[in-house]
Image (cartoon, rainbow, N blue to C red):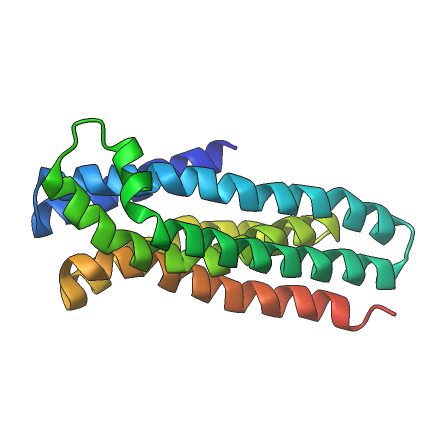
Amino acid sequence: SFLTEMSTGISIFVFNLVLLQLSDNYAVAAYGVIANIAVVVLALSNGIALGVQPIASREYGSHNWDHVKEAIFLGLKVALGLACILYFVLVFFKYPIISAFDHDHSLALLKIATNGLPLYFLSVFFASQNLVIMLSLVAIERAKAAFVLSLLRGYFILIPSVLLFALLFDLNGVWLSVPFTEACVWALGSYFLFNALKNKQ
């Protein structure tokens, strides 16, 4: 969507600006590599969310609340399982994965990216859940809640977190701002979702 593309563009701009202040072009290039890997990782998680949404929506329309909950909770479990596998693969095979994206074979880029990747991708545990949560909220006619989560995830938590964490923890803070953002969104999203489902019998 236009909003997603715009928020992604703004967050990339802020990340690049902060990384240039803290380090050099190699840090920006390392972020580019990590962001490209993230696109692939999140696409896999999004596939689960897109699988859950029509089932939850159909069951919601039929007032089969137990089936709605079953579909959503199964989606969340599968997403978490996938996140564990993805994180394991990313951390243990980080050198060949990063090298595949590093066409110039830069050692400086490799060093920054291999340090940043395990920190940045702590976010996958929460992001995979968030994608399921947001599309599940849309499926049960809670689109406003999903929209709020999307804004927080793309702008209102992420950007201040990048700036604050960079100030506190330098380069590591930039990478950690992403899992922090996703964790905050997960906490709020879980509240929205459980609140929407708890009274349905």
Residue ID at (38%, 50%) = 90
Residue ID at (41%, 48%) = 154
Residue 11 at least partly seen: yes
Percent of width and height locating residue 68:
81, 57
Percent of width and height locating residue 91:
35, 54
Q: Is 84 in front, or is 73?
A: 84
Residue 16 to residue 102: above or below = below
Residue ID at (73%, 48%) = 139
Q: In this view, does 37 lie to the left or right of 149?
A: left
Q: Is 155 in front, or is 95?
A: 95
Q: In this view, does 176 lie to the left or right of 53?
A: left
Displayed quadrant of residue 181: bottom left
Percent of width and height locating residue 117:
30, 52
Quadrant containing the C terminus is bottom right
Residue 82 to residue 96: above or below = below
Residue 145 at least partly seen: no
Residue ID at (13%, 35%) = 106
Q: Is residue 145 left or right of residue 67?
A: left
Q: Is 123 in front, or is 84?
A: 84
Percent of width and height locating residue 57:
79, 47
Residue 70 to residue 99: above or below = below
Q: How many labels does the image show?
A: 0
